[in-house]
Image (cartoon, rainbow, N blue to C red):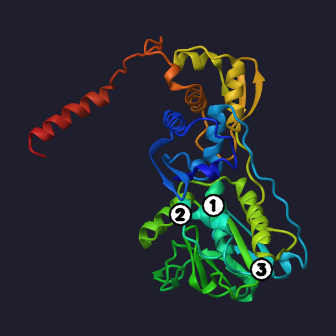
Amino acid sequence: MLVSWKWLSRYVDLTLPHDELVDRLSLSGLNHEGSETVDGDVVIDLEVTSNRGDCLGHIGVAREIAALTEQKLKIPAIEYQESGAAIDESLAVENKMPEACPRYTARVIRGVKVGDSPEWLQESLKSVGIGVVNNVVDVTNYVMMECGQPLHAFDLAKVGDGKIVVRSGKDKEQLEAIDHRNYDLNDSTCVIADSSDALAVGGVMGGASSEVTEATTDIVLEAAEFVPLSVRRTARRLKLHSPSSFRFERRVDPVGIDWASRRACQLITEIAGGSVAPGVIDTAPEIPARETVLLRPKRVAALLGLEIETAELDKILRSLGCEVSAFADGLQCVPPSWRHDLTREVDLIEEVARIHGYDKISENSPIPVAPSSKRRFDTAMERIRGVLTAAGI
């Protein structure tokens, strides 16, 4: 994950020098692969583990920095006006494949003027290796690199009958993607289509037939959630990998889908003009609440070997976005929507250790360790394995 120093500074005050900051990030789990200067901007390459899809955007990395340096995270405020005919007068959406696409949302923006992006937007994308296309497409890429939620824009005039259908691919169906190569679809492929033809491979790449060009005036803005396994299988089968598929394979924030869509509407109308149609089409607006996880300070001490005050535990977890309240033996925590990996008490203890600092855990901490005992089954399997390998099997 390439992150721009200038870009990060829009969301958090970078109070530490570069070398100290990347060391802190490495010690907290975002390993520093290297840094380089691009047109006067320092670009940092971070290794993001597969369970931390929330750090595949600048806001996610900024949230980590804010927690590590006790700074305030600055999320952009979203403001734009809706006008004209309601969205359902020009667009309908039908989801026939919820097992691969649990949630699909769409907004319509009318009267855009497609052209070159402003310099600040082009510089931001180029700094992290994203190519510049036009102001509408560039905004979708910018928002993806901002918050980690992939988006896609369709030319509304090229959506047959004004209807989006999420479905499986048909036998012998093909799609020319925006890389202008043809791909064979099948019934395991999640396809975004209109009333007759495929327009995109869901969660992977859009199609050339509906891409935004200088002739486009009205657009459909897609923001969706695709199942990681479905995206992974399709990307591998087609040998078609993209920044979008990379993020969907690691799961996106279900609550952040709408934020990303509205953020893109804000930037597109500011840069390319046009007006947002009132309303949004959302095939699954109900988002299940996260389950509460209990954190006991005694358990923290037992696993880490050091005492951490309850107030400090509370502060660390809140800085990471958890909702925290007290209970008799410790804290009740509701993990944020973007942290799919926080489901157990031990997960929260690991978060505390990361932010508090692994270096503060003494090598001589009194952490109880007991040797595991083998089951009779394990002993028997070892003996059988030894006999079989000795026999050349």
Pointer 3 local density, CA inside 10 Å: few below 14, some 14–19, many at least 20: many
- Viewed as shown, does residue 379 lie left or right of 256? left
The local secondary structure at tag 2 comes to helix
Q: Which amino acid type is marked by label 1?
A: Met
Contact check, label 1 and label 2, Cβ < 8 Å: yes
Please, which residue is most extreme toward the right here? 84
Would you name the residue on which mark 3 appears? 112
Q: Is residue 126 above or below residue 380?
A: below
Q: Which amino acid type is marked by label 2?
A: Pro
Q: Is residue 101 visible?
A: no
The local secondary structure at tag 1 comes to helix
Rendered location of residue 97, percent (x, y): 63, 70
Q: Nearer the viewer, residue 318 or 252?
A: 318
- Viewed as shown, does residue 198 lie left or right of 258? left
Of labels 2 and 3, earlier in sequence is 3
Would you name the residue on which mark 1 appears? 144
Of labels 1 and 2, earlier in sequence is 1
Q: Nearer the viewer, residue 282 or 156?
A: 156
Q: Nearer the viewer, residue 289 or 122?
A: 122
Q: Which amino acid type is marked by label 3?
A: Val
The local secondary structure at tag 3 comes to loop
Pointer 1 local density, CA inside 10 Å: few below 14, some 14–19, many at least 20: many
For the residues carrying marks 2 and 3, which lies nearer the camera in this image?
3
Residue 200 lies in quadrant: bottom right
Rendered location of residue 376, percent (x, y): 30, 26
Would you name the residue on which mark 2 appears? 243
Report, in whole angstroms, how far the alpha carbon at label 3 lies from the one at label 1.
20 Å
